[in-house]
Image (cartoon, rainbow, N blue to C red):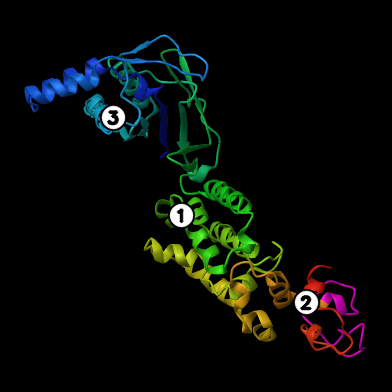
Amino acid sequence: MPLYALFLDVKKAFDSVSRYFIFEELVGTGRFSVGELNLLAEMLDANLLTVRDGISVSESIVQSNGVKQGGSMSPFLFIFALSDINSIFVDFPDVKIILYADDMVLLSSSLDDIRRSLELLIDYLAFRDLELNFDKCKIMKFRNKGRGRLAKSDTLIVKNEPIEFVSEFTYLGVVFQSSGISFSKHIAKKVRAAILATAALKSLPKSSLSTALKIFDLAVAPIASYGIQVIWPYLTLHDLNKLETVKSRFLKKALCLSKFMKSRLAYELADSEFFMEKLASQFSLPESPTFDKFIDNQLFKISEIDPAFYGAPAMVEQSWKNVCYTMRHALTRHACHGFHFLLCKRKIYHTSATKECVCKLCDKEIDFYHFLSCDKNDLSLSQAANL
């Protein structure tokens, strides 16, 4: 059975709600003393606004509606104005409402029930000087894993205002899709935002590695992991792999490596845990076959690393991880590819040495890290890194 979700946008909700209505409702509770009501009356009384543009000051503007932006009581007063909203749906038991401040969602398997309850909701809001912004109101039909077309009867017109059916909608920062069980577009959006945040960290390669990892935890990880506790059970292996690229791209930038370098090498150089592993631990996320498969795949890739990699100077000596270490790029790049391509006679691209690998300088069969041991090589690591 399909499920309809109607996402409602209240026009300038906090700026428009009736102060007179709020005060009447507060008085009607009978829970406030005369002194408290006098204080609330002062808070909700009309106030004057002026606009200063640096040259002149406007005439005073009377503000008699809305709660004050930034006021500590404002959220409570607004929520109080809508505290009896559930009374609308008494005759529509199939309709559920999700309400977070002024963000509302109506849920029902019956489009007709949504239509009729919405008409009542519009009148309810109008009594509080609130109205819907129909251009921003959207409706989704969660169905059959998102497959199939909308039925001809899937139309919603209320008060002569048509409401558009959409295949995806962002609610409270989470992108919902019509399948109801896929969050691939949410993951793609958050990954893109996190990578842009990484790109903005221009001085990252100069930071100490420990500082860089703290920056990741504070400035990048929260962007990528937004909503992770809610969507975790529905993430596919592809989603987890995509999320993991956020940290691998960050590490590569901090390590002065190309974004095309194998991610497994970046993790080993940084001696850092996988992003998904950290999130699972941090948020106590449940284990799943998908997560287990992800970890198995990552560990298998680590096992494929050439043992010679662990003998590279960058893996043996750790001073390059300090702040403003000028040779970091040379050491990390040598560890990842050994500058093998500068010496090997083989023209085709390859990521491991074979018996066909012969040095251009000494004509000897070479391994992947021959660069530092070649008697005929006059280049330093720094010179090679800058070629």
Name the residue rendered at 50%, 19% in the picture. Answer: 53
Where is residue 155 shown, x and y percent of the image? Answer: 48, 23
Q: Mark 3: which amino acid? A: Ser
Left or right: residue 227 versus residue 81 is: right
Residue at the disc numbered 1: 234
- Residue drawn 59% across and 68% down? 323
Instruction: Please report the residue visible at 31 percent of the width from the left and 33 percent of the height from the top.
Output: 97
Task: State which tag comes first along the sequence, 2 or 1.
Answer: 1
Label 1 near label 3: C-beta < 8 Å?
A: no
**Callout 1: SS:** helix
Q: Residues within 10 Å of mark 3 (few under 14, many from 20)?
A: some
Q: Nearer the viewer, mark 2 or mark 1?
A: 2
**Category of crowding for the residue at label 2, using alpha-carbon neighbours closer than 10 angstroms: few (below 14), some (14–19), many (at least 20):** some
Question: Circle 2 sits on which residue?
Answer: 381
Identify the mark at residue 74; answer none if there is no mark.
Answer: 3
Residue range (magenta): 341-364
Whether residue 305 is visible = no
> Which comes sooner in the sequence, label 3 or label 2?
3
Calculate the distance from the C-alpha at mark 2 to the C-alpha at mark 1.
Answer: 46 Å
| Spot occupied by residue 3 in the image (x, y as percentages of width and height) | 41, 37
Q: Amino acid at mark 1?
A: Tyr
Q: Is residue 363 inside the magenta stretch?
A: yes
* Contact flag, marks 3 and 2 (Cβ < 8 Å): no
Which residue occupies the extreme front position in the image?
55
Q: Counting residues from the N terminus, which is met first, the one under dot 3 or under dot 1?
A: 3
Provide residue 35's location: percent of width, then percent of height. Answer: 9, 24
Q: What amino acid type is highlighted by mark number 2? A: Leu
Local packing at callout 1 (Cα closer than 10 Å; few below 14, some 14-19, many 20+) is some
Front residue of 311/368: it is 311
Residue 132 in view of the camera: yes
Q: Secondary structure at mark 2?
A: helix
